[in-house]
Every structure is written in structure tokens, then in C-alpha cells.
Amino acid sequence: MTDAESRDERQRFGSLADYRVPAMPTRDTLQIVLTRARELFRRKPQGPLVDDARLRSSTLDMLDEAAAPPACGPVISELQATLGAWAEGEPENQRIRCIVLPPGDRNRVVASWAERHGHAVLEAPARESILGADPTGLPDLEGDGVLAIPTLEDWFIRHRDGLWLVRALLDRLTELDRRVVVGCNSWAWQYLVRAIRADAVLPAPLIFQPFDAERLHRWFCEISNTNTREPIQLLDASSGEDILALGDDGRPHDRLFSLAARSRGVPWIAWRVWRRSLRRRVPADDDTDQDGDAVVPDVESDDAHTLWVIALEEFSLPGRGSDDSLLVLHALLIHGPMAPARLADVLPFSGAGNTVNSLLAAGILEHDEHHRLACTPEAYPAIRTGLTTAGFPIAEV
């Protein structure tokens, strides 16, 4: 085990209330402001080392070498470090543990942890069966060992007839003589606390430690060293600097501080944004010398094992964040991925097709592997900003 792996595996989940989003250091923020001010007054701005026209999206193989899945990084191992002793039955007063995760968890962290360590997993019924169903239809929860309920958000629909099942589930958990791990989307948790006082039944939720620049650096270095036949260089397209090299002061590159702040410390958001920022360079005629060999000024190497990191992509809501768009996005953050027919059940208006199509075209929404509508993880910071500005109830993470 490497030192980096050891440091990350010692991380434990902490209280949701203590989660702190990584921020730009003051000196970096001031430097950004000064740089932008200089650029405003500069008659001829200095161009990037590699022109954008010469960069192309990386192939899937190159992306998997530089930023391989899973997008959750070491979080599953950290969950085991947090719950392992408790799950094995050491004396403990707390019979239920609650894990709250930000939206966009496509790796199903709680379910993956439970399956990896041989714990029982209770999946939610199909959403179409929740409305109008018999409240006595709760699955049997009895058994031995740890029971994991990975996605509490799948047990309800934000509808006047859509909360009976999650109420029955929580009531049953208070009577169950068994260790239980409940996972929940942070937006669903915020809603359920308000709607049915879920926090009166479930303990204070836990969440992973935020992925700051240092954690991102260790994770990305581990990926690039583990999944490649030859080392991959990740160079800043503006300056040619090695993104994964530490500075003279031992600090990660500024790009990683920006990525940590932009992703709010959430690994799957950082991972998606990171992959979208990786480009390969397309050689041009003036890149060759008299013998036809590739030449790139001021950069030590620029071959099949070099990727260029461009500026982080900015997202904006279509139509300046209309009320309809925000209502669709808020519903999907609370419920997670939904089929279009189920989305219609939780919206206060009909005919959301055009709104959904505009959000898909803008890259704010996407279809998941089950063809359900979902908020694009890398667009989450922009979505959250839009909802905050409009006065929507906002999750802690």
C-alpha cells in the first residue's frame, strides 16, 4: 500500500453538519482578480501555450488511463473504515447509521459497500407502485447481520399520496432489532426532515471528508500511476505546467484548488469535470522539423502519453433559469434519476417536455444508463447557484 493510499484509507466519514466546501486560498483568489484586471487592460492578451483549435477531446481509452472509474474514488473504502467495526458487532449503542451523499452518485456507494462486505441490501420498490398502493405492503426487514437501505430517496414521491411508504419504513426501523445503514441523497434528506421529521428517527447523518486540492492530487496521481502502461503527462494548456507536480512549497497546482472549490469537494463531480477538461493535441504541419519529427516549443514531451488540461467548463441555465427549469431541476435533485412519466407526477405544472428538452440540449440534464432523466453531475454547482438565487430550499451539500 502506498503512503497516499494509506492516508486516504484512514479518512473517516464525518458529520454532515461539519462538511466544509473547499475554498480558494485568499492569495490565489487575489491573484485571480489581479490577473483578470491585467488582462482587461492588456492590449494583446498572451495566448495559451497550445491553441484551443489544436486540442481535441480525448479518446475513452486515454480518459480511462488518466481518470479511470469509479468516480467515487476511495469513498467506499472510507465507508468501510467508518462502519467496519460497528458492522462486525462491537458494542455500540447506535443501531442505525445514516449516510447522506450529494447528488450524482452513479456508483451507488452504500449499495456497493454493502455488497462488497456481504451485507444484505434492501432495494426500493418500483416508483410507479408507490402512489395508491397498500400501506401494508412493506417488505420484510427481519434477518441477521447488517441491512443496507442504499437510497431512501427511492422510497417516496413528493406527492400528497407519495409519503406513506417512507413513513412506514421509518416506523418499522424503530422496532427492528437489527443493525441498519440508511443511505440518502442530501436533497431528499433535507426534504424528508421538513416533511416527516426523518431526523427524529434516523441519527445525525455522516458524509465523506470533502475532497480538497490535496485529496484530489493524491487520487489523480494514484489513478495515473495505476492504470497506465507508461506515465501520462497532464499539462496545463495555458502554461505547459505539470498539473500533478507539487510546487516548491509542496502545494498542488492551482487547477486542483479551482477544481476542488468548483466541485464543492464532491469526488464524482470533480471526476466528471476533470475528464471533460482533458484534451489531446492534434499535430500540425509546423510542428515538425526537417526530418519530419514532432517539435513542440517549451514542452519536454508531447506524444501519445500527454494530455492537456483546459479551463474548467462553465454551465449556465437556459432561459436565465426560468421557474419551470428550476422546478424540474429541484424535483430531480430530490428524487434522483426519474423516468419522464414519474417526473410529471411531482411537478406542479403539465407539459414539461419542452423544458426538459432545453435542459438536455444545454447539458444540464442527461439520460442515465437506465434512460432516466438526471441532473448532470458537473452542472450541479450551476444548478445549485440557480436554485439558491431563486430562493429554493437548499441541501447542506
Image: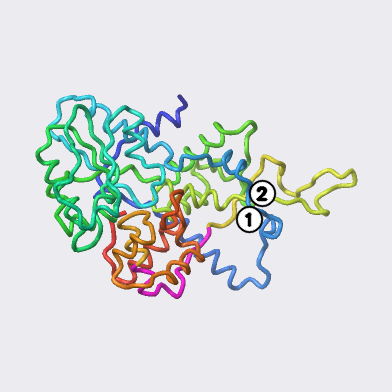
Report whether 149 appears left or right of 292: left
Q: Which mark is residue 238?
A: 1
Q: Residue at x 60, y 73 (%)?
A: 41
Q: Looking at the image, which is closer to me, 344 or 136?
A: 136
Q: Residue furthest left?
A: 175
Locate the N terminus and report the quarter of the image it occupies: top left
Magenta-span inclusion, residue 72 = no
Q: Percent x, y for residue 157? A: 25, 57
Q: Looking at the image, which is closer to me, 86 or 46?
A: 86
Q: Residue at x 34, y 72 (%)?
A: 350
Region rendered in magenta: 313-327
SS class of the residue under badge 2?
strand
The residue carrying pointer 2 sits among few (fewer than 14), some (14 to 19) or many (20 or more) residues within 10 Å by Cα, namely many
Magenta-span inclusion, residue 326 = yes
SS class of the residue under badge 1?
loop
Q: 130 above or below 12?
A: below
Which quadrant of the figure has residue 175?
Answer: top left
Q: 171 above or below 44?
A: above
Callout 2 amino acid: Arg
Q: Looking at the image, which is closer to me, 161 or 215?
A: 161
Q: Which residue is mark 2?
A: 280
Q: Percent x, y for residue 189? A: 24, 53
Q: Residue at x 32, y 54 (%)?
A: 397
Report whether 214 appears left or right of 13: right
Q: Looking at the image, which is closer to me, 193 or 214?
A: 193
The residue carrying pointer 1 sits among few (fewer than 14), some (14 to 19) or many (20 or more) residues within 10 Å by Cα, namely some
Report whether 260 appears left or right of 239: left
Distance of mark 2 from mark 1, alpha carbons?
A: 14 Å
Which quadrant of the figure has residue 242?
Answer: top right
